[in-house]
Amino acid sequence: MKRWLPFVKSEPTVAVIRLSGMISSSGRGALNDAALAPAIEKAFSKGKPAAVALEINSPGGSPVQSSLIGARIRRLAEEKDIPVLAFVEDVAASGGYWLAVAADEIYADPSSVVGSVGVISAGFGLHEFINRYGVERRVYTAGQSKSMLDPFRPEQPEDVARLKTLLEDIHVNFKDHISARRAGKITTDQDLFTGEIWLAKRAVELGLIDGIDHIKPHLQKRFGMKVQIKQYGTKKGLLSRFGAHAVSDAVQGIEERAAFARFGL
């Protein structure tokens, strides 16, 4: 009732957006711009938050979705003139770190993993397997590069060269983004864009993050002990709650588990 009374000061509110999991354009529970857009828009628009905080726990994923999510956050932050703070949990690596630098300031737990500013592409070669079982691969294309890196055909040097060019170009975009968002903060004495990872204390020294802290005590120190925290995030559909997608959930869970495992988590 207090908030509706004139001349009565209400306690500051901080909107918290949880960004946890793989970043992908598909897959239920994956972080992508389409799924997160409603929550992000509400976080910046509902009431007058003193700040928007990002709770990040992501090993990365799609560079495009990372860029779209980060761009939406920055656009709203500038339109609404609202500061954005990021708090890293287990990991903010690769695309997860891209999301973190959408914030004006980044904080982490002492054991949080940060960095992995690089680009990776992985797959399998199955041509020997199908040959062993007498499977004949039939592919017809118009355009000599249409079947580039077909996993059922032997790897071609020219295909690998083209892929490496694409990866390098994406890496340049990543480096430019970090350099712009952390301008004046990141060290110039060390190459931070090799894909290496660091724990929070070293990340502070390198300028990759701003400090070591946890979300609630930091917000209380910054906005007062009575600060109100409002959580925003994606919601599971009705079928998901009853386990109607058990098989796809299991596959996605394995992929996500493998991604986190790359960082010893």
Image (tube, grey):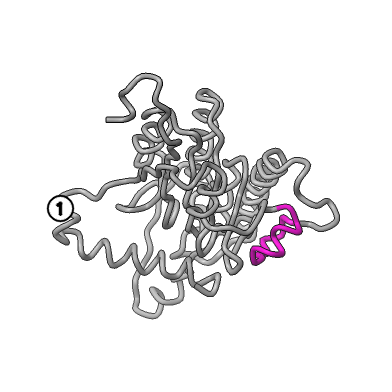
At a point 57% along the width and 41% down the height, the residue shown is 102
Count of number-bearing discs: 1
Residue 129: x %, y % from top left: 41, 76
Residue 3 sits above or below residue 118 on the image:
above
Residue 181 sits above or below residue 27 on the image:
above
As drawn, is 234 to the left or to the right of 245?
right
At a point 53% along the width and 28% down the height, the residue shown is 75
Q: Which element is circle 1 on?
A: helix
Determine which residue is flagged by label 1: 239
At a point 51% along the width and 48% down the height, the residue shown is 220
Residue 194: x %, y % from top left: 71, 60
As drawn, is 74 to the left or to the right of 23?
right
Towards the viewer: 159 or 251: 251
**Extreme residue in the right direction:** 189
Check if residue 124 falls in the magenta segment.
no
Towards the viewer: 250 or 106: 106
Residue 197: x %, y % from top left: 65, 65
Check if residue 198 falls in the magenta segment.
yes
Residue range (magenta): 192-207
Quarter of the image for residue 138 reads bottom left
For the question of whether residue 158 can be seen, the reply is: no
Residue 73 sits above or below residue 208 on the image:
above
**Extreme residue in the front direction:** 7
Check disc 1 and give the amino acid type: Leu
**Extreme residue in the top direction:** 6
At a point 43% along the width and 46% down the height, the residue shown is 141
As drawn, is 194 to the left or to the right of 106?
right
